Amino acid sequence: MGKIGLFNLEDQFAFYGAYHNNPVNIAIHEFFVWPIFFTALVILYFIPPFFNLPNLEFSLWQSHVVLVWNVGFIVALIYAAYYVILDPKAGSLGALLCALCWVVSSFVARPLGFSLAWKVVLVAQVVCWTAQFIGHGKRAPALFDNLAQALVMAPFFVLLEALQTLFGYEPYPGFQASVQAKIEANIKEWKEKHHKLIMS
């Protein structure tokens, strides 16, 4: 609870939550955020490795899978580590999902090949991002105010939302109430600024 800045889960969750505060918007993000992360890893698979480490190869469902230690691995690792730091319990599940996305994206990317993969990824990204922009309504997405924060926090936000909705999970007692108060304050401040812009 004493963490600050990027590692303060309450502040990060409240920031993102202020932009996603209605059921339709939340549902859209629950459905489309992780596919954005996953398909990004699919295309990153084709970046050559920059470690002098042998690729990890194994058979999965009668297919040959090759895990490449490249940018895709680093991205998945950074996301996973960040989520564990934010909240060890839910973050561990988030880290597991990141690892799973990395492995499965490698499983998908290799047989597709780059010439087909980039087209599939492009379509998926356009569809997912378009759906999210539409879901925001009048308020611009969080990425316009803080690109890095919105992109990195988004998958964990929807995971934590799902855990709260389905199981009533809280990282610590009073978390949800505190976050909700910050979200309401943020929305109130935005509405006041928006109203002044319209009136001016």
Image (cartoon, rainbow, N blue to C red):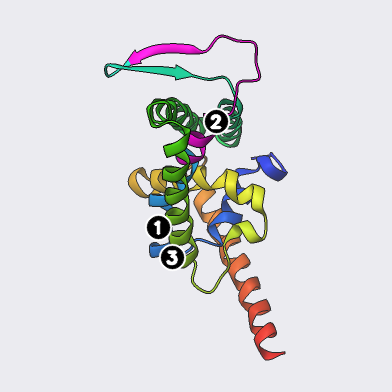
Residue 53 occupies quadrant: top right
Q: What residue type is labelled 1?
A: Ile
Q: What residue type is labelled 2?
A: Ala
Q: Do the residues labelled 1 and 2 touch (CB within 8 Å)?
A: no
Residue 132 placement (x, y as % from top left):
47, 60
* Number of numbered tags placed on the structure image: 3
Reply above or below: 66 against 174.
above
Question: Along the polypeptide, which appears first: circle 3 or circle 1?
Answer: 3
Question: Quick check: can you spot residue 174?
Answer: no
Q: Residue furthest front?
A: 115
Residue 181 occupies quadrant: bottom right
Give the residue drawn at x 67%, y 55%: 146
SS category of the residue bearing label 1: helix
Q: Judge whether residue 118 is colored magenta.
A: no
Question: Marks 1/2: CA distance?
Answer: 23 Å
Q: Quadrant of the N terminus?
A: top right
Q: Which amino acid does label 3 sit on?
A: Asn
What numbered label is drawn on residue 76?
2
| Residue neighbourhood size for the residue with mark 1, other residues' Cα within 10 Å, grouped as few (<14), some (14–19), many (≥20) | some
What numbered label is drawn on residue 164?
none
Foreground of the two, 5 or 127: 127
Q: Quadrant of the C terminus?
A: bottom right
Question: Quick check: can you spot residue 186?
Answer: yes
Question: Marks 2/3: CA distance?
Answer: 29 Å
| Residue neighbourhood size for the residue with mark 3, other residues' Cα within 10 Å, grouped as few (<14), some (14–19), many (≥20) | few
SS category of the residue bearing label 2: helix
Question: Marks 3/1: CA distance?
Answer: 10 Å
Residue position for label 3: 22
Q: Please state the extent of the stretch shown in magenta in the rendering.
A: 39-59
Question: Along the polypeptide, which appears first: circle 1 or circle 2?
Answer: 1
Residue position for label 1: 28
